[in-house]
Image (cartoon, rainbow, N blue to C red):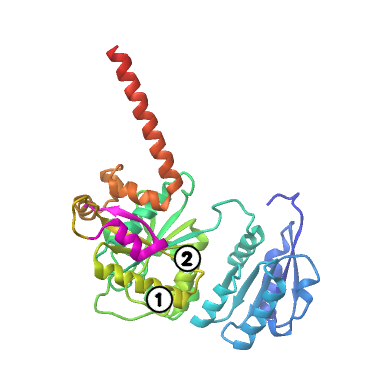
Amino acid sequence: MASGSKTKKILLVSTDTTFLQDTRTAFAASEVIELLTLEKSVNELRGEILEAAFGTVIVDMDAAKLEEIESLQRVMRRLEGSVPVVVVTQEFNAAAVRILVQLKVADFLVKPITTADLVRSVIRALQGPGREENTESHIYTFMPAAGGVGTTTLALQTAFQLHHSVTRGASTCVVDLNFQQGACAEYLDLEPRFDITEIENQPERLDRQLLDVMLSKHASGLCVLAAPTRPSDMRSFKTDVVVRMLDLVAAYFDNVVIDLPRTWFPWTETVLLGSNKLYIVAEMTVPCLRHTQRLIQAVYETAGKEVKPNVIVNRFEQKMFDSGIKQADVQEILGEHFVGGISNNYRLVREAVDRGVPLHAIDPNANVVNDLKKIILPEEAVQTMAKSKSLFGLGKGLLKRKAG
């Protein structure tokens, strides 16, 4: 921030003496941020947060206590979205995570936290909805409607397209949440390095340095967070472990692509609520499309109407004289949730998987690559098509002149 910028006030509400002092020290050197503190619990808050023009409010609370959650809800209602709120909590459960996401707090951090993480979170909150486009992480989640529908392939190709995008290209990370049978790292011939058992009982240990050690890095710059597969170890992990991991990844990467397992875990709902885009991957069979309908309903029942499932039908084939399922049938079954089909190109996909390379490394103009780009980056797909037509027209003109 420039030294000539207008000073912004932030308010810290906390009864933790050590945390108050550490936060004062962290912001003391700032010329554009003025920290004010209020030594009260969230339960004691009344109209103080409305008395000054605060740019951000930091609330230190125990999100595992129902009365403090209810007090936070009252605070959020008073603010009416006018001031971003950053929540700092000692510990929380899955229900608290859902509530915090639904309340649309700007961020939530779990103690112990570094002052650098807190400062970074506050700065992002201060930038608010008016910040420059693409400075906040965008999360794309892929969920399979059935086994073997190609979810991992589409998730990885989406990550590469975002990573190399003209409009959204920046740092990108793929997160493989299929801890038992994930294949994201293997599809790219990378070694999975995320040891979730190391942080299972102490999720706060996962910081930027440890995350960097556990990331698998592709030659293109794309990062993959994947755990070594354990097919016989079918168990879930605590929601706060998964949330801590995703929160940290989102803080350091501009694009996050999540590959979800078929099994619905206690943390699945939280992942869905935190996603900017949710894609359900299906295929053109009646059983799969019917299950996709049920899956859409399940998403709405658990995550609410804030999450809209978008359905991609993989291995999409439309033959004029085929007696099987037609595109009209797919659209009738899925309605507005159907966002596009991906051509069936088994030979290309199999070669890419066997060689451990992305699809575009074999054929950058493959139908699968172009079909997916129309869904994920429609504005760039249109520009690419227009450029191709322009070059084609220029080529025809040159041929005519040459022939003449």
Q: Earlier in the sequence, mark 2 or mark 1?
A: 2
Mark 2 vs mark 1, foreground winner is: 1
Q: Is residue 330 magenta?
A: yes
User: In the image shown, does 331 or 196 lie closer to the viewer?
Assistant: 331
Please report the bounds of the magenta region as a residue range.
325-345
Vertical comparison of 352 with 59: above or below: above
User: In the image shown, does 380 or 206 lie closer to the viewer?
Assistant: 380
Q: Which mark is residue 275?
A: 2
For the residue labelled by badge 1, is the local secondary structure a helix, a strand or a loop? Answer: helix
Quadrant of res 197: bottom left
**Which residue is located at x 38 percent, y 38 percent?**
385
* Residue 100 located left or right of residue 72: left
Which residue is disc 1 drawn over? Answer: 298
In the image, what residue type sits under mark 1?
A: Ala
Vertical comparison of 171 with 117: above or below: above
The percent position of residue 360, horizontal first and vertical second, equals 30, 46
**Which residue is located at x 40 percent, y 44 percent?**
381
**Which residue is located at x 38 percent, y 73 percent?**
196
User: In this orientation, does residue 9 appear?
Assistant: yes
Quadrant of res 181: bottom left
Quadrant of res 233: bottom left
User: In the image shown, does 360 or 144 lie closer to the viewer?
Assistant: 144
Q: Which mark is residue 59?
A: none
Could you tell me how far apart the alpha carbons at marks 2 and 1 are, in whole angstroms? Answer: 16 Å
For the residue labelled by badge 2, is the local secondary structure a helix, a strand or a loop? Answer: loop
The percent position of residue 57, horizontal first and vertical second, equals 69, 70
User: In this orientation, does residue 110 appear?
Assistant: no
In the image, what residue type sits under mark 2?
A: Ser
